[in-house]
Structure formats: structure tokens, C-alpha cells
Image (cartoon, rainbow, N blue to C red):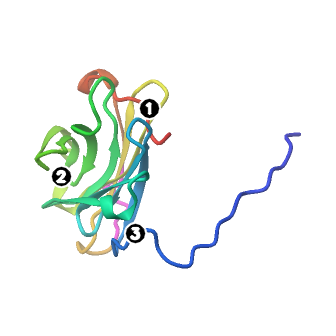
């Protein structure tokens, strides 16, 4: 049987960042730049903060639709472009301009009722992305509107492993 280890625990009296997230998710540590990026799904924002520079380095991108998760793209500078799960599917985000282009869309009936949710990159470079009923569009529905997609790495120049 494996040895049981104790969790480290920290007590925080004041927040490190004052982003006032409505639904902050998807933290991703960028090793090369010592930064953390995360999304606010409800406010449709992507936040990035340098751990070396501290809270004053916070940068926020605002979008017209929800961005739910991010991942690095192998061979591409994550300070320039990253992969994002967005309202309608998977997209490549230009972090300098804040513009993104869809790589693929979900294409389901009633697409306005769904959005991407959580996602991750597996050890083989494939991106897995889930969907769910979007907020404000009535009760969550189990009628097949929630799905799990696996996108092959060759479709978008091989996604690198994330969340170091």
C-alpha cells in the first residue's frame, strides 16, 4: 500500500488578486514565463498574471462569448497564441490582439443552448473538451446537449501538455 502524505495547507487572509470573478476556472501555469492564466466563464474574460511581478502585472482580455479553458500549442509561443475552449467550440487565440479563429465548432442542433466547459490535453497531445447547457438559457438539460469531444492533435499543430 502506498504511503499516505499530508496535504500542504495555506491560510490566506487577503486575496492575491482582486479580479472579482463570477466563475473563475481553468488555472494554467506557464513554466517558461512563470505566469498563471485563468478564465472567468461568466464575465467572458481571460486573466494572466506574472508570479515574478505580482498582482500589478494582471492583464485581462475581454471577449464577446465565454472562454472556458486554455492550453498551449506545441511549437508556438504561449505569449502569442493559445488554444481556447470557447462558446461554439475550439479556437486559436491571438493574445496580442484578443482575436480568435475557430478550429472546429460543435455543430449541434440548438448550439445556442450549449457552450464548451472544461478541457485538458492528454499525454498524446489530444485535446478533450466537454460541453454543457449555457447559463441563462433555462434549466440544464440531459437530452444529449452535454458531450465530451476528443480532438486529434494533428488538427491543430499538436497541442502541448498543459497545467504543469
Choose the circle earlier in sequence order: 1 or 3.
3
Q: Secondary structure at mark 2?
A: loop
Q: Residue at x 39, y 29 (%)?
A: 160
Residue that protrudes farthest toward the bottom in the picture: 13
The crowd level at tag 2 (other Cα within 10 Å; few <14, some 14-19, many 20+) is: few
Q: Secondary structure at mark 3?
A: loop
* Gap in angstroms between the C-alphas marked 2 and 1: 31 Å
- Depth check: give the residue in front, 62 or 10: 10
The crowd level at tag 3 (other Cα within 10 Å; few <14, some 14-19, many 20+) is: few
Q: Can you say whether 105 is above or below 48 in the image?
A: above
* Gap in angstroms between the C-alphas marked 3 and 2: 39 Å
Q: Is residue 107 visible?
A: yes
- Depth check: give the residue in front, 6 or 150: 6
Question: Which marked residue is nearer to the observer: mark 2 or mark 1?
Answer: 1
The residue range painted magenta reads: 140-147
Taking the image as shown, residue 135 lies to the left or right of residue 23, namely: left
Q: Can you say whether 84 is above or below 42 in the image?
A: above
Q: Position of residue 135 (x, y in %)?
A: 28, 70
Taking the image as shown, residue 90 lies to the left or right of residue 125, namely: left
- Depth check: give the residue in front, 102 or 100: 100
Q: Secondary structure at mark 1?
A: loop
Find residue 9 and report its image quarter.
bottom right
Q: Residue at x 25, y 27 (%)?
A: 156
Choose the circle earlier in sequence order: 2 or 1.
2
Residue 161 is marked as 1
Residue 17 is marked as 3
Find residue 89 and report its image quarter.
top left
Amino acid at each position: 500500500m502506498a504511503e499516505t502524505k499530508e496535504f500542504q495547507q495555506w491560510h490566506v487572509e487577503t486575496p492575491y488578486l482582486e479580479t472579482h470573478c463570477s466563475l473563475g476556472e481553468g488555472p494554467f501555469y506557464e513554466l517558461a514565463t512563470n505566469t498563471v492564466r485563468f478564465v472567468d466563464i461568466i464575465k467572458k474574460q481571460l486573466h494572466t498574471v506574472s508570479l515574478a511581478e505580482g498582482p500589478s502585472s494582471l492583464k485581462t482580455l475581454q471577449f464577446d462569448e465565454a472562454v472556458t479553458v486554455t492550453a498551449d500549442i506545441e511549437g508556438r509561443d504561449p505569449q502569442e497564441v493559445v488554444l481556447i475552449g470557447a462558446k461554439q467550440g475550439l479556437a486559436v487565440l491571438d493574445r496580442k490582439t484578443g482575436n480568435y479563429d475557430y478550429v472546429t465548432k460543435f455543430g449541434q442542433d440548438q448550439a445556442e443552448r450549449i457552450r464548451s466547459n472544461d478541457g485538458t490535453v492528454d499525454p498524446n497531445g489530444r485535446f478533450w473538451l466537454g460541453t454543457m447547457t449555457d447559463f441563462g438559457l433555462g434549466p440544464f438539460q440531459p437530452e444529449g446537449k452535454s458531450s465530451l469531444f476528443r480532438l486529434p492533435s494533428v488538427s491543430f499543430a499538436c497541442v502541448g501538455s498543459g497545467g504543469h
